[in-house]
Amino acid sequence: MGGGLKITTGIIAAVLVTAAVAQARSVLAPLAAALFIIAIVWPIQERLQSWLPKLLALAITVVVTAATCAAFASLAAWGFGRVGRNLMADAARYQAFYDAAVMWLDGHGVSFAGLWAEHFNVGWLLRTMQYVTGRINTTLSFWLIALVYVVLGLLEVEDAGRRIGRLENRTAARVLLKGSKATAAKFRKYMLVRTQMSAVTGLLVGLFAAATGLPFAFEWGVIAFVLNYIPFIGPFIATLFPTLLAMTQFDSWPAVFGVFACLNVIQFVVGSYIEPRVAGSTLSISPFLVLFAIFFWSSLWGLFGTFIGVPITLAILTFCAEYPPAAWIADLFGGSHEDKPKTA
């Protein structure tokens, strides 16, 4: 009876915590992003402030971080800029494809013009513009708050470590200190794995585009590399636009569908088969849990959740591995025995 009560209480607590995390996304998501960034860039800050003033080291670290993000955004903008001009030049052909599709649907009893007038009117356009504007404002606010957290957090890392080290509860101090260091190391490994898999995806997409004669093969590879950091949405965009270009380059629809299918196969094999296994073996986490974390956190926090889901899961498992009563959770979901704390 006691065991059943504990299980029931645990399930209720998990449901309540999940609901609270989902409702508090506007507060917790920027904090999670900031903690992740701090864990990634802290070695830079630590090395710089060993021979520079702390505030100057902080400024350099923040500038390097922002420059890295801007470089990735610039790569994507460069690739889409090169490809976009070609797509715009073929606007007449896309209009012809659209007219042919409408005629085919009308010939099969589907009034596409009526559907368009019913669902895609001025009101829909205004609502869409309001939604997009709201999303842009939300995104800018999100990253502004995260940046403030990063700046303040980098200044507090050493002081926080000293305060934790002075805790009277030595078990809690050990778990927090060792767990934080191990989690930060795994975050850096995780980003290394994502970079490697993004590079593999970009290389395969570029080689495939070159082999099939699709223009802008190098640009497609760069776009696939950058967008692969954004789970699901990024690979979809990196697959859709080459297919649109293929519509004007190849005379047969089977060739167009073949391009679309092959690009999806590349994205699926690398993203859903190779990457979870590489991440699982490198980070001591079950490949099944990697995919579950992506879907679970995306349901709670949307697009950002698809990116931060695996790091959050890594952090939970790492802290469990450092706390003996919860070490079985890390063992169950792939934690290696070397990660477990040694007990006397």
Image (cartoon, rainbow, N blue to C red):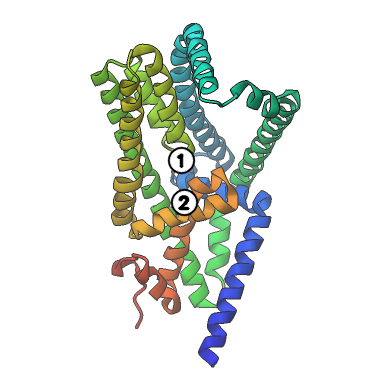
Q: What residue sits 60% from the left and 68% below the top?
A: 15
Question: Foreground residue, 13 or 107?
Answer: 107
Quarter of the figure with the N terminus = bottom right
Q: Nearer the viewer, residue 279 or 299?
A: 299
| Residue 158 point in image, percent of width and height | 54, 55
Task: Determine whether 101 is above or below 89 in the image.
Answer: below
Q: Residue at x 62, y 66 (%)?
A: 17
Q: Which residue is mark 1?
A: 232
- 28 to 262, vertically: above or below: below
Residue pictured at 54% horizontal, 92% vertical: 2
Residue type at the position of mark 1? Phe
Do callouts 2 and 1 mark residues in contact (Cβ within 8 Å)? yes
Side of 54 relative to 24 (left or right): left
Which quarter of the figure has residue 214? top left
Position of the C terminus, as image quadrant, is bottom left
Q: Which mark is residue 339?
A: none
In this rendered view, identify the residue nearer to me: 243 or 337. Answer: 243
Which quarter of the picture shows residue 186?
bottom left
Total marks in image: 2
Residue 117 makes an appearance in the image: yes
Secondary structure at badge 2 equals helix
Q: Element at badge 1?
A: loop
Kind of residue at badge 2 = Ile
How crowded pointer 2 is (Cα within 10 Å; few <14, some 14-19, many 20+) is rated as many
Q: In the image, is 10 to the left or to the right of 200?
A: right
Mark 2 = which residue? Answer: 294
| 3D distance between C-alphas at marks 2 and 1 | 10 Å
**x and y, in percent, of residue 154 in the image:** 56, 47
User: At which x and y percent is residue 25?
Assistant: 65, 52
